[in-house]
Amino acid sequence: MTLPGDFQFSQGSLQDLVDCKRRFQLRYLLQIAWPAVPAEPYLENEQHLRLGALFHLMAQQHTLGVDEARLTAMASEEPLAGWWQNFMQQRPALEGTLFPEAVLTTPFGQSGQRRLLAKMDLVAVSDGRATIYDWKTSRHRPPRTWLADRLQTRVYPYLLVQAGAELNSGQPFTPEQVEMVYWFAGFPDRPERFIYDAQRYAEDGAYLTGLLDQAATLSMSDEPFPLTPDESKCRFCVYRSLCNRGIAAGDVNELDFDDPEPMVEFDLDFEQVAEVDY
Amino acid sequence: MTPSTAITTLTKAQEAAGAAPYDRAIFLEGPAGTGKTTAGVQRLLNLVQSGVAASSILVMTPVRPLAKPYSEALRRTRLRPGSIPALVTAGGLARRNVELFWPLVSRQAGFARPDSPPVFLTLETAQYHMARIARPLLENGYFESVTIDRNRIYSQIIDNLNKAAVVGFPYTEIGQRLHEAWLGDESQLRVYNDAQECATRFREYCLRHNLLDFSLQVEVFRQHLWSLPECRDYLTRSYRHLIVDNLEEDTPFAHDLLRDWLPQVDSALLIYDQEAGYREFLGADPDSGAALKVLCAEHLTLNQSFVASPELNALGARLANALRQPVTAQPPVAPEAVRQTLLFREDMRFYPEMLDWVAGQIADLVDGGVTPGEIVVLAPFLSDSLRFSLTQRLAQAGIAARSHRPSRALRDEPAARSLLTLTALANPDWQRTPEQFDVSYALMQAIDGLDPVRAQLLTKIVYRSKANAPGLSSFEQINPDMHERISYVLGGRYDTLRVWLADLQRRRSPATLDHFLSRLFGEVLSQAGFGFHDNFDASQAAANLVESVQKFRQAVAEVDEQQQDDEGGSVDPGREYLDMVEDGVIAAQYVRGWQEVDRNAVLLAPAHTFLMMNRPVDYQFWLDIGSRGWYERLYQPLTHPYVLSRHWQPGRQWDHDDEDAANQERLYRLAVGLLRRCRKQVFLGLSELGEQGYEQRGPLLWAFNHVLRELALSAELQTQPVASQNTPL
């Protein structure tokens, strides 16, 4: 299947393309639903993801001015209670105009028909400078080198420079005005900060476009995309049985620094608001 | 209506709506097919390209499919970098904001656990909880005089709550309103009291357990959130430009929200389809939508149809006349030209003959070069048997058909059925003994290469049920002759599956049904040598099932935990889920976003569903036009769309004249709505006897007879002899 002309890339889909091209093809291009267990223990993992989502919601509610005491009362379960206490006591100083859950998009690739899209936890704009905050609720605190390689670290600042003018009274941000901060709810005293510059911006632009070209080229053939050479990744990939690369899901405690994928993938699209049909 | 690709340039009126300055509210109205949505889409694109922050634009439609032209245009168009507009329904907006501002309103809204997160119910999970409340009451004689299926009782009580919420009256007045308007047998009054009691108990139960069905989401938003400065400021500051399409299909809840919001926005475009309002039975209120016109500074009307020909429009006007409805002026069209928009055969006695005729006509059209996607077959209701009969006939002619929903009930999906049977086998203590046929079918689905004959043979040998507990025996223990007939390869696969199931059963693991199904899928059925390995339809059905079970578990978990504390008892959600699927409470008929619809297939749909898809076609087949189903409301003894509407005068009684007038108007809107979504020709399917074998003489048939008589007379007056084909039906 050829990469559709209006395909929307996200940091998640690009990360899959880098990690395992076959996974990108199955998940985003062919959209194959494959309900295997992503990681064990199943319920513990589900609970962790649920509380992680709740933490993100509470952080957004906090930004919108919901009373802190009421939010604190909501955080009764562990590890959410601990994360929230950390957030209350050691969150970064959020200054300026705050844009929670900011969704940005830009035309992507040569034709410009495809798009790059991201939803950022929070963008704080102050004196023409922008800081992207990403709340992390992962079990382990990843090292800087690991984070630096993540597509998120490249896509978010790039996109903010490309498409963030709306957040800055119509003035585009220069790369030097942008930085990204990972704040770890479980390790509040060890945030990781990435500053951005023109060289990095140019490199990211070329790199991301290269990835798009790679996906487009691979999709011209009917062949399955190449599988990752790192088979340890397959233990946490639901498609492991389709690729004949394992039976049981891996133990989430053996996962490096990422959270396993949710059972139901968040589909970032133009239709942002969930609803009940009536 | 979905913009036609044929429209490459905009009319002046469309341009005026699309490019009007972004500092005013515009009310754009007109009949279906006149390009109103195209104008709306253009305005959205203009707004985005003009430099307005896309995130400040809110596009609101009554249901999500009606937003498709907008989302497709956004995807198709090379937009400048920036944010994205929000495409929402009023219900979706309510839900999102209830979630966002929950800590601020949960206490005052009366929830028993205000510091715990809300649990949002789907229609299915709401129905499940309603069943839990109503079932014991039904056992005690509630709704004794009502003869409809239990699930319809549950859904009508939920429907009443929804109507109270969207119309804006207290849910405690449902019974009284229905009671006061009733003119007939007194036993019905008891039914209304029972319906009220169930609704009240359900609401109290929801408040006790932090459950929010659609009605409670709307009520919390309407009563607590919209007046809350944090929420109201957030919404009015975030969204400065509104585009609202199909206003006439939305509810008073949406209209009230807009009434407050419009004075505060920079710009708005409200799009109103005249002579529509097909969702009235779900609480839509065209009149309260039309009332928003006075709040708009600019009024525009589009009249020129891009879809229906003048002849079809003239036919609509004649039908309006026959149904005693106001007739809009139409340009003169020769009677014979109007007549030619209709095709029918009048000598068919039995229903199957009519279906044969329909299939034959479709085959002729397709042979003549018509794309199947340009043909729709419409009926007042689409029964499974009708769908099956017609699909079979079309398949024989080599024509693909699709029904109005691409998904089927889960229990009808082979892969899901197989998983549910294997679940029963893995849980013998649940004492659900599958039939031999189901086990053999499950094995056939599960094991790659196992044909029906060998599946039946294997099942006969290995499947036993002792004291209502099903069990499977080992392949190795069976007669060696049978080994060879079934083959060692397939037998080995069977044993892998059996051992896997037995092992889980022995270890009492996993604890939840969705986990079990996920593991069964991942560790066995999708492995090489098993039936789901590279079967993406099966994996999709399995994914739907796992998701449905997971949502169900999450929606009942909170309640069960509490009940366990309160009452010391608990139900296994997995077992409960299977019961609900069996009872038809859970059909899990939802369509995943990525499921593609085969556009190149003949569509079979209930007429109202087709109208809400808002997609014109070249040819329409109206089945069984003699059926009273085209005219009469669905039998709903527990609810009433008119009595529970905002326009109903308390204390009035609903009599036969009201019913006739409402049906007449409904039929008119339906017929004209369909004609406005037809480009070329309408085929009328009629047989003397209907699907159930009764003689058919309904008002739609009568109206067409009237129109044909008139056309014949007009043609005669124009000196043309009356052609035999112009005789009434």
Image (cartoon, rainbow, N blue to C red):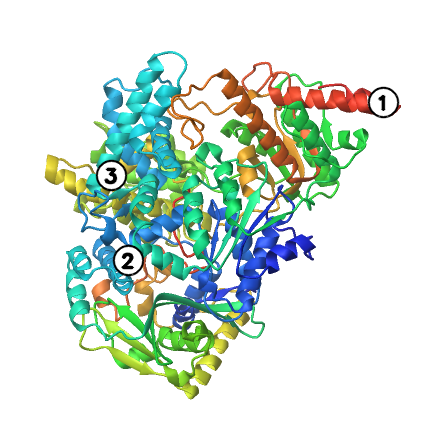
> Subunit of mark 1?
B
Q: Which residue type carries mark 2?
A: Ala
Q: Which residue type carries mark 3?
A: Cys
Q: Position of residue A169 (x, y in %)?
A: 43, 74
Residue located at (58% from left, 19% from top): B690
Q: Position of residue A162 (x, y in %)?
A: 46, 76
Count neighbours of disc 1 (C-alpha within 10 A) and say few if under 14, some if 14 to 19, many if 20 or more: few
Look at mark 3 in the image and give the residue it sits on. Answer: B206
Where residue A110 sits, quadrant-wise, is bottom right
Is circle 2 on the same chain as circle 3?
no
Residue located at (23% from left, 46% from top): B512
Look at mark 2 in the image and give the residue it sits on. Answer: A248
Q: Is residue B393 visible?
A: yes
Q: Nearer the viewer, residue B605 or B572?
A: B605
Q: Position of residue A185 (x, y in %)?
A: 21, 69
Look at mark 1 in the image and give the residue it sits on. Answer: B717
- The local secondary structure at tag 2 comes to loop
User: Against A68, is B326 above or below?
Assistant: above
